[in-house]
Image (spheres, helix red, strand yellow):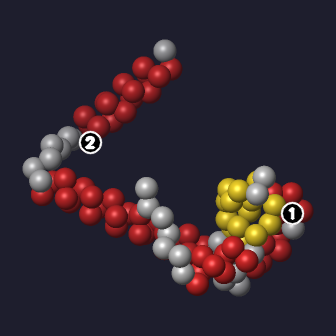
């Protein structure tokens, strides 16, 4: 599991923490803050469970995850890992779903 390295951004996020109830009551305010670049952490029973973040931050996180997954795939291929066709992958996925439904 990867952890976000503690930096000014994560410290800033923890300063803007609200409960689920507070977030629900003032959602528009938290969205407006996110548009201004200010994230809000939402907690339930004192534990962080979600965050309202600027869309640019979310997109950067998605891109970073894609890069990380691509690097992992390249490493598997470089080590001579096995590959499958898209058809084989889909067949396996649907077989798993059918098996779980039974």
* Residue located farthest toward the left when viewing the structure as drawn: 80
Q: Closer to the camera: disc 2 or disc 1?
A: 1
Identified at 83% across, 70% down, the residue is 28
Q: Is residue 87 visible to the viewer in this orientation of the structure? A: yes
Per the rendering, the mark at residue 86 is 2
Residue 96, image quadrant: top left
Picture quadrant where residue 74 is located: bottom left
Mark sitting on residue 46: none
Return the x and y of residue 98 as percentages of the image width and height: 44, 22
Q: Which residue is mark 1?
A: 22
Q: Which percent across, then down, holds residue 2? A: 44, 61
Name the residue: 17% across, 44% down. 83
Question: In this rendering, is residue 8 above or below 10?
Answer: below
User: Does dot 2 land on a helix, a strand or a loop?
Assistant: helix
The foreground one among 41 and 28 is 41
Residue found at the very far top of the displayed protein: 102
Give the alpha-carbon distance from disc 2 to disc 1, as whole Å. 45 Å
Based on the displayed image, in which of its 4 quarters is residue 1 positioned?
bottom left
Image coordinates for residue 24, horizontal then vertical, percent: 84, 59
Residue appearing at x 54%, y 81% in the figure: 7
Q: Residue at x 68, y 59 (%)?
A: 48
Looking at the image, how many numbered discs can be counted on the residues? Answer: 2
Secondary element under disc 1, as helix, strand or loop, is helix
Question: Visible in this render: residue 31?
Answer: no
**Residue 17 location, x and y as percent?**
76, 70
**Neighbours of disc 1 within 10 Å: few (<14), some (14-19), many (20+):** few
Q: Earlier in the sequence, mark 2 or mark 1?
A: 1
Image side of residue 66 versus residue 43, left or right: left
């Amino acid at each position: 599991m990867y952890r976000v390295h503690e930096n000014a951004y994560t410290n800033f996020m923890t300063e803007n923490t609200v409960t689920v109830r507070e977030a629900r009551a003032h959602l528009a305010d938290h969205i407006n803050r996110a548009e201004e670049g200010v994230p809000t952490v939402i907690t339930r029973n004192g534990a962080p469970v979600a965050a309202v973040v600027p869309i640019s931050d979310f997109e950067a996180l998605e891109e970073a995850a894609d890069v990380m997954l691509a690097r992992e795939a390249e490493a598997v291929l470089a080590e001579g890992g096995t590959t499958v066709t898209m058809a084989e992958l889909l067949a396996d996925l649907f077989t798993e779903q059918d098996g779980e439904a039974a």
